[in-house]
Amino acid sequence: MSLSKLAGKGVYVQGNDIDTDRIIPARYLKCVTFDELGPSLFYDVRFESDGTSKDHVLDAHQHEGAEILISDDNFGCGSSREHAPQAIQKFGLKAVIAGSFAEIFQGNCTTLGIPCVVMDEANRVKLTADVEKHPESEIIIDLEGMQVICANAIYPILMKESTREAFLTSTFDPLDNLLGAKTEIHSTAKKLGYA
């Protein structure tokens, strides 16, 4: 199934250089399954040590059910932990719009089917103003047209062409690609004398 468009409410998490340790603190990497990571997304900036809410934007009533995360430059920098995009996905977020991304983080998101699209600062300022003023507005990310549509405004976006092509042709998950090529794998193994 190709991923050419997706839509959802947005939420803006402000800040440059948001690293993977802020996205999912290291103490949560001991989880048995990735499913446990959602509630711990941005834990240290969302909650006090006793679990009391810090009234983080992700917990704001008006952004409940948001599916598109908007942020700033160098999102996902730091260590290359796969748990960061897993936590984003398990929290219920489907895509990230930012000024730029750390390459490994972006690659890990891609294999999970989470598009990371780049939008320049001027347009992100306008988009976040729309989201903050009208949090119920739907954001549409169109990977075919390479644009974001929200509140009757259209914003251009960027994505590496090979990544975009992977989403449009449903080849973003390498394991799925491998499992879908069993016939070719067995044929090659036989030719090489392994089967």
Image (spheres, rainbow, N blue to C red):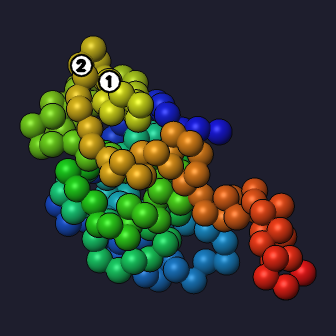
Determine the residue located farthest toward the front in the rendered image.
191
Q: Quadrant of residue 22?
A: bottom left
Identified at 35% across, 80% down, the residue is: 79
Which residue lies under the disc numbered 2? 153
SS for tag 2?
strand
* 161 relative to 157 in the view: left or right: right
Residue 188 spot, x, y in % from top left: 78, 72
Determine the residue located farthest toward the top in the rendered image.
152
SS for tag 1?
strand
- Nearest the eye: 32 or 100: 100
- Nearest the eye: 144 or 7: 144
Identified at 38% across, 61% down, the residue is: 106
Q: Is residue 143 depicted above or below 115 in this figure?
A: above
Label 2: how many residues lie within 10 Å, few (<14), some (14-19) or many (20+)?
Answer: few
Q: Quadrant of the N terminus?
A: top right
Give me the C-alpha separation between circle 1 and circle 2: 6 Å
Task: Say if mark 1 contacts mark 2, CB within 8 Å.
Answer: yes
Type of amino acid under label 2:
Ala
* 45 relative to 94 in the view: left or right: left
Q: Quadrant of residue 124?
A: top left
* 104 relative to 110 in the view: left or right: left
Q: Is residue 54 depicted above or below 192 in this figure?
A: above
Which residue lies under the disc numbered 1? 149
Residue 94 spot, x, y in % from top left: 49, 45
